[in-house]
């Protein structure tokens, strides 16, 4: 039987986050490793069953992981950092991921442009790499025992090296000649498992702009790997973008096929003629693996026509665009969702049926569909139609407003604005402030929850929030901070809070997606045109302002961050969606300002992570991201001071863009990288004011006065005091009051000491 339908990978956390619970119970000592492993086994079985029931032909093993597949790969290669080597196998795996009292955890970072985080392998010349294939073999046999011949998923050697870091001097790719033989050994081992073995080798790094020396590794690597054993079929798979440079090279190696993302990497179509002229299989990713919308089936079938015109159908297999790890599990539990909205969605389990259905239509024709499939097709077509026409998606007033926009930027140049603001607000040099949130106490969470469940009345809820704000403001006054905040007690999450108040945003009950380890997030989704029915924050902020004569900072989440932490509709460009959010925020800023608020912070915590994977697309991204930040703040009067906040410390390549956003003040995360970062601002001739975080809020440690004085002095070595603000490096909501209070007292005291010392020249 030929293989027609294919799933790149399946979520592993479980439909009710069973893996999360099992992991956390094991970590807390409430259950044994055997119990954890038994949950893992039953989840794997269930997940395979889902795919079998949907008649998927190519199902993976080794897409499962107890923590992360990059970590698994490091373990498979024996890339164990020295500080974990003395530990037993069982202890070691989670110690590497989570750290121990003695050894810090390995670093974690974002998997390409998704919100999944992988563990960064640490490599060094002195490591002794040895193969440990037990997990892979075990999972293969486990599936086999259930009657499934899986394809085996592996992270390819070039991606593995490209995403690792060297802890000694040198580059990861220098270790290629030591790693590759282990992969060869692995492949030989796997080839003995069965008559025919198919391997899916993931090389997502091929979708980035690769340097020539990395490109030159592709051919020798795959010449060797594909020749390890005659019964091996290698499918080199990429996703999230096109991989044209690599595909061209791979076609000249003895691999069996290439897996390409035709949803997020349309340019992959450029290599169709080359694929056609080769002997390779094409695994065509046509069902979006990282979004939640039902497939637009007419468009997909048209795309398949294009494929079939170039390549014989028997050389094509239909697939998801990437692993379904990036989508929630199943719609089954979305009972509370509006029926119409639910009919537009498709999570991992539903996507299985889509792949299967599309494959049947493609290979056997629509006429051959059985009645169950016909019904599914009918319902997909209806939902496609309803998305095209639904009045809750298409709001003409919003579209016209956005189209007719004439004001794209605020009045006044920076120099003029800042002079007015300083006069109007009268804040001192080295002004002190915080990033917005204060500790989310159990009482605050409880009040929010009870209100959501309808257990307390709105009046009661607001009363409790006001009590929190009272305390928060009086603490800040007592502490002597210059610019105050209300503390964000009413916000569960900086995106969800605004999403809930904007038309066009939807929420799920069970739309969990793994972020890292046992942690999952439940992103809201944007299904329709965005508008703001009423003010979102003014009541809280003006209440807080009424308690103090110091300036109270209004707090909003910026358009790019709203987008990057949501599932976004796929029937409108991201740049257009972002623009609609910007317009809604613009109105909010106008309202805040009219009710007497004169400092407003627009957080762009996720600005950097929205960057495209390909350099060629950066210019476009930057241009609309900056445009929309500016639209959002375009209603601000010259006297109104606009702040922004970004949560990271790598600004080298984007400093010009940050400057172009034209915020009056930016606060950034520098506490962990000293004043190096600031030098970049100075070199770039950055003029606006900057609040480099003077202490790290990610740790419970309370920084001392002396140490912050030193830190401020270092900052003053780089920038003049008129340009500097002093603040922690991010919001304080994850900290405890016992940590926050002394830290901020110390911060204010440190500033007092520096202010009274003679100014050093910068
Ligand atoms: N204003 C937000 C807060 O303080 C910013 C959070 C963030 O940058 N992630 O919580
Ligand atoms: Zn932050």
Image (spheres, rainbow, N blue to C red):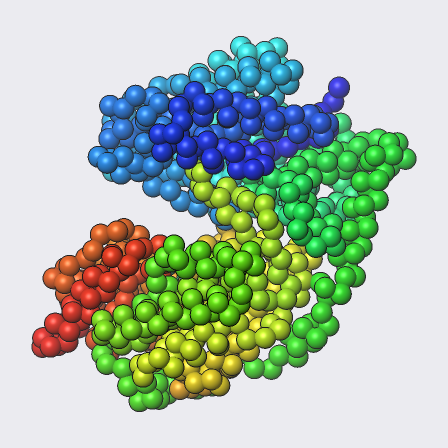
- Using residue 289 as the reference point, say whether residue 134 is left or right of it: left
Residue lying at 58% horizontally and 46% vertically, measured from the top left: 511
Classify residue 703 by image quadrant: bottom left
Q: Position of residue 194 (x, y in %)?
A: 59, 11
- Using residue 754 as the reference point, say whether residue 181 is left or right of it: right
Q: Of residues 623 and 607, which is closer to you in this image?
A: 607
Q: Position of residue 465 (x, y in %)?
A: 43, 67
Residue 564 vertical position relative to residue 371 in the rendered view, above or below: below
Q: Position of residue 432 (x, y in %)?
A: 26, 72
Whether residue 140 is visible to the viewer of this picture, yes or no, is: yes
Residue lying at 70% horizontally and 55% vertically, measured from the top left: 338
- Using residue 306 as the reference point, say whether residue 266 is left or right of it: left
Q: Of residues 187 and 554, which is closer to you in this image?
A: 554
Whether residue 716 is visible to the viewer of this picture, yes or no, is: no
Q: How many marks?
A: 0
Q: Position of residue 313 (x, y in %)?
A: 77, 31
Residue lying at 46% horizontally and 20% vertically, measured from the top left: 135
Classify residue 543 by image quadrant: bottom left
Q: Of residues 443 and 479, which is closer to you in this image?
A: 443
Residue 761 vertical position relative to residue 577 in the rendered view, above or below: below
User: Outermost residue, right direction?
Assistant: 367
């Amino acid at each position: 039987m030929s293989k027609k339908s294919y799933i790149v990978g399946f979520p592993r956390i479980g439909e009710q986050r069973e893996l999360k619970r099992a992991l956390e119970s094991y970590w807390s000592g409430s259950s044994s490793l055997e119990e954890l492993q038994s949950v893992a086994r039953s989840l794997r079985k269930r997940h395979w069953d889902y795919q079998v029931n949907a008649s998927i032909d190519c199902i993976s093993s080794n897409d499962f992981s107890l923590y992360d597949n990059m970590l698994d790969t490091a373990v498979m290669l024996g890339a164990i950092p020295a500080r974990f080597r003395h530990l037993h196998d069982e202890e070691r795996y989670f110690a590497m991921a989570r750290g121990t009292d003695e050894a810090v955890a390995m670093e974690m970072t974002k998997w390409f442009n998704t919100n999944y985080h992988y563990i960064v392998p640490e490599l060094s010349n002195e490591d002794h790499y040895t193969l440990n294939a037990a997990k892979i073999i075990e999972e293969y046999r486990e599936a086999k025992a259930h009657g499934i011949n899986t394809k085996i998923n592996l992270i390819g050697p070039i991606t593995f090296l490209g995403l690792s870091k060297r802890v000694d001097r040198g580059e990861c790719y220098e270790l290629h000649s030591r790693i590759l033989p282990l992969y060869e050994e692995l492949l030989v081992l796997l080839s003995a498992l069965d008559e025919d073995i198919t391997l899916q080798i993931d090389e997502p790094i091929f979708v980035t702009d690769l340097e020539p020396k990395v490109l030159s590794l592709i051919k020798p690597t795959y010449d060797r790997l594909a020749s390890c054993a005659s019964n091996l079929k290698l499918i080199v798979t990429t996703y999230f973008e096109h991989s044209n440079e690599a595909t061209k090279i791979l076609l000249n190696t003895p691999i069996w096929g290439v897996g390409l993302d035709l949803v997020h990497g349309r340019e992959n179509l450029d290599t169709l003629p080359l694929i056609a002229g080769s002997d390779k299989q094409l695994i065509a990713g046509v069902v979006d693996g990282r979004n939640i919308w039902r497939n637009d089936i007419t468009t997909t079938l048209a795309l398949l026509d294009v494929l079939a015109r170039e390549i014989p159908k028997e050389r094509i297999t239909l697939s998801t665009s990437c692993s379904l790890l990036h989508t929630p599990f199943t719609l089954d539990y979305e009972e509370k969702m509006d029926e119409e909205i639910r009919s537009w969605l498709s999570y991992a389990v539903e996507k299985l049926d889509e792949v299967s259905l599309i494959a049947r239509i493609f290979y056997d024709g629509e006429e051959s569909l059985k009645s169950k499939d016909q019904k599914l097709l009918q319902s997909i077509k209806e939902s496609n139609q309803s998305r095209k026409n639904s009045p809750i998606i298409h709001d003409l007033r919003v579209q016209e407003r956005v189209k007719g926009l004439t004001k794209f930027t605020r009045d006044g140049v920076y120099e003029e604005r800042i002079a007015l603001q300083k006069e109007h607000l009268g804040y001192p040099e080295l002004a002190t402030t915080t990033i917005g949130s204060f500790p989310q106490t159990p009482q605050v969470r409880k009040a929010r929850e009870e209100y959501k469940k309808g257990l307390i009345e709105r009046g009661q809820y607001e009363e409790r929030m006001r009590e929190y704000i009272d305390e928060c403001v009086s603490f800040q006054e007592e502490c002597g901070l210059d610019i105050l905040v209300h503390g964000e007690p009413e916000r569960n999450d900086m995106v969800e809070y605004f999403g809930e108040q904007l038309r066009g945003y939807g929420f799920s009950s069970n739309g969990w997606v793994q972020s890292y380890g046992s942690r999952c997030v439940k992103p809201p989704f944007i299904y329709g045109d965005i508008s703001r029915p009423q003010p979102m924050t003014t009541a809280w902020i003006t209440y807080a302002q009424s308690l103090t004569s110091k300036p109270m900072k209004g707090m909003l989440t910026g358009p790019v961050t709203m987008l990057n932490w949501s599932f976004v509709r796929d029937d409108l460009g991201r740049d257009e969606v972002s623009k609609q959010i910007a317009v809604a925020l613009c109105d909010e800023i106008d309202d805040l300002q009219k009710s007497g608020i004169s400092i407003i912070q627009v957080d762009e915590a996720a600005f950097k992570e929205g960057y495209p994977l390909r350099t060629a697309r950066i210019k476009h991204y930057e241009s609309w991201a900056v445009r929309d930040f500016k639209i959002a703040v375009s209603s601000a009067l010259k006297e109104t001071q606009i702040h922004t906040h970004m949560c990271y410390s790598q600004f080298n390549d984007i400093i010009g863009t940050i400057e172009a956003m034209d915020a009056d003040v930016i606060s950034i995360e520098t506490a962990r990288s000293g004043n190096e970062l600031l030098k970049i601002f100075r070199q770039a001739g950055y003029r606006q004011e900057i609040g480099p975080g003077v202490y790290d809020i990610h740790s419970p440690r309370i920084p001392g006065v002396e140490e912050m004085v030193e830190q401020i002095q270092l900052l003053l070595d780089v920038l003049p005091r008129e340009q500097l603000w002093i603040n922690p490096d991010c919001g304080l909501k994850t900290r405890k009051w016992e940590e926050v209070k002394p830290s901020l007292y110390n911060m204010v005291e440190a500033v007092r000491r520096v202010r009274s010392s003679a100014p050093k020249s910068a």
